[in-house]
Amino acid sequence: MRGRMMQTPLLISSLIEHAGRVYGTQEIVSRTVEGPIHRYTWLDARNRSIQLAQALGAHGITAGDRIGTLGWNTYRHLELYYGISGMGAVCHTLNPRLHPTELVYIVNHAEDRILFVDLTFVPLAEAVADKLPGVERYVVLTDSENMPETALSNAIAYEDFIAGSDGDYEWPVLDEGDAAALCYTSGTTGHPKGALYTHRSTVLHAFGVAMPDVFNMRPSTCVLPIVPLFHACSWGIAYSAPLAGAKIVFPGPRYDPEALTDLMTAESVNYCAGVPSVFIPLVQYWRDHGNKPPSLAMAVMGGTAPPPSLCAALEEDFGIEFRHAWGMTEMSPLGTVNTLMPEHRALPLEQRRIFQTKQGRPPFGVEVRIVDDDGNRLPHDGIVFGELQVRGPWVIQSYFKDDESRLTEDGWFPTGDVATIDSQCYIHITDRSKDLIKSGGEWISSIDVENTAMGHDDIVMAAVIGIPDERWDERPILIAVAAPDSNPTKESVLEHLAGTLAKWQLPDEVYFVDELPMGATGKVQKTKLREQYAAE
């Protein structure tokens, strides 16, 4: 017997329609690429997204066509999210931090028909345009007054592109299983691979992100997403904010501590999210200037494990709740969030800090398990580790243009991470399977050594890699960035590590560098470190 409920499809257009109707006066604030602060409302965003959808249709864009974006976090980029997907096309966000050869491959593989480009990235687009034969038109995200001279073919200012649309438009009723957004991941072997999200998966993911124990989105939330709109759909914030009616503040092209602090203070931001490499200088800036934004109450960090000292600084020095999140592009990207339960908050400080290094628990919509090398389930006892596998309505089944299923025979997605899961379903990722170090027949977790090293007062960032060793097969070495105005030594770091690590887990060498090589998504590029240090 079937139930008798409406079969209303879950569509991305319904998110912006809801925000326009119910939270129409709630603000969206952007620092623009041109410079000035721009303000408008969710109703304005809804109306302009409709104009964009009309303009795309007038250009001949039809359902399923891919439309590329090279943009910062601004209101115009937000409109692309809704105008493109809402009319049935696929919003393909491009990471401008990638190497140009990777961008060329991704745009051509996606077969993007139009490329929307922020002013900053016009030179980048010009440099690769002759290698993008499928791109029919370039739309520069500005107005005619600020439109630059450009060699891009059929280039037009965004405001001119949508100006001919009168807003007399109804969002099409699409199948909720239709493709809506496309993000490529570089976390796989070979060429970048595309995760193709549906309307249904995106709306369900927005509900998951908004939940209290996840990002706690609500009308009183004023969120500043430091995580870019081109990085895994800004962790879903651009979709969960209209769902919950939150105010959203976009930082535009400026991510320096002064600009972020000024914007957070001026707009009474109470929540922000980003990778640790952005928060480290931000916290140092607050210490140096004594100007932590007074309203900021919560920070969510993901992308890579944050240093324990950073977590401690946020909570103890500045009174900001810290939440550690984990996910993957293949998961839209939400996987888990470490929100402490009352019993965890009652733990002694040192134990609580250790617990916060865990990646947290999955929200409703994500299931997790660990398995051994033969695919057998392992116990959730917080001790035994195995390959972490996930499943749920916002987890991919296969990659774009690749019919090969990436799932196990019983329908789980292998993440490539090695983890433990405790009895309360808190996940602790001990390593990427490719980053585990096998020394003398024993496994060493590079993440455990890194987290311990970053507990040293004079270390702000650290990376551990394995290098070939004739006797032990592999041995770990530590590459660290020292805190400002400090002078740590190899001996002091090893002494600190020896307090919690076994002797055979200690790095053979400790190298100090000014900075670690960071990838386009804010993660340390260990492949480059291996290339550099394997020969030393």
Image (cartoon, helix red, strand yellow):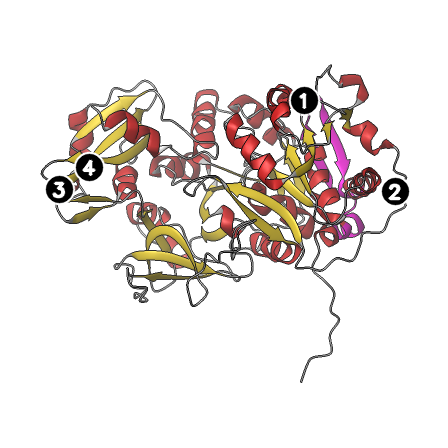
Estimate the spatial distance between the alpha carbons at disc 2 and disc 4, rounded to whole Å.
62 Å
The tag on residue 167 is: 2
Which comes before the other along the chain, label 2 or label 4?
2
Q: Dot 3 surroundings within 10 Å: few (below 14), some, or many (20 or more)?
A: some
215 w.r.t. 373: above or below: above
> In this figure, which residue is indicated by the disc labeled 1?
119
Which comes before the other along the chain, label 4 or label 1?
1
Disc 4 versus disc 1: nearer the observer: 1
* Residue 345 can be seen in this image: no
> In this figure, which residue is indicated by the disc labeled 4?
497
Quarter occupied by the N terminus: bottom right
Disc 3 versus disc 1: nearer the observer: 1
Whether residue 32 appears in magenta in the rendering, the answer is yes
The image quadrant that residue 7 belongs to is bottom right
Measured as percent of width and height from the top left, residue 32 is found at 68, 25
* Residue 279 can be seen in this image: yes
Estimate the spatial distance between the alpha carbons at disc 3 and disc 1, rounded to whole Å.
52 Å
| Mark 3 and mark 1 residues within 8 Å of each other at the beta carbon | no
Task: Determine whether the residue tagged by mark 3 lies in a helix, strand or loop.
Answer: helix
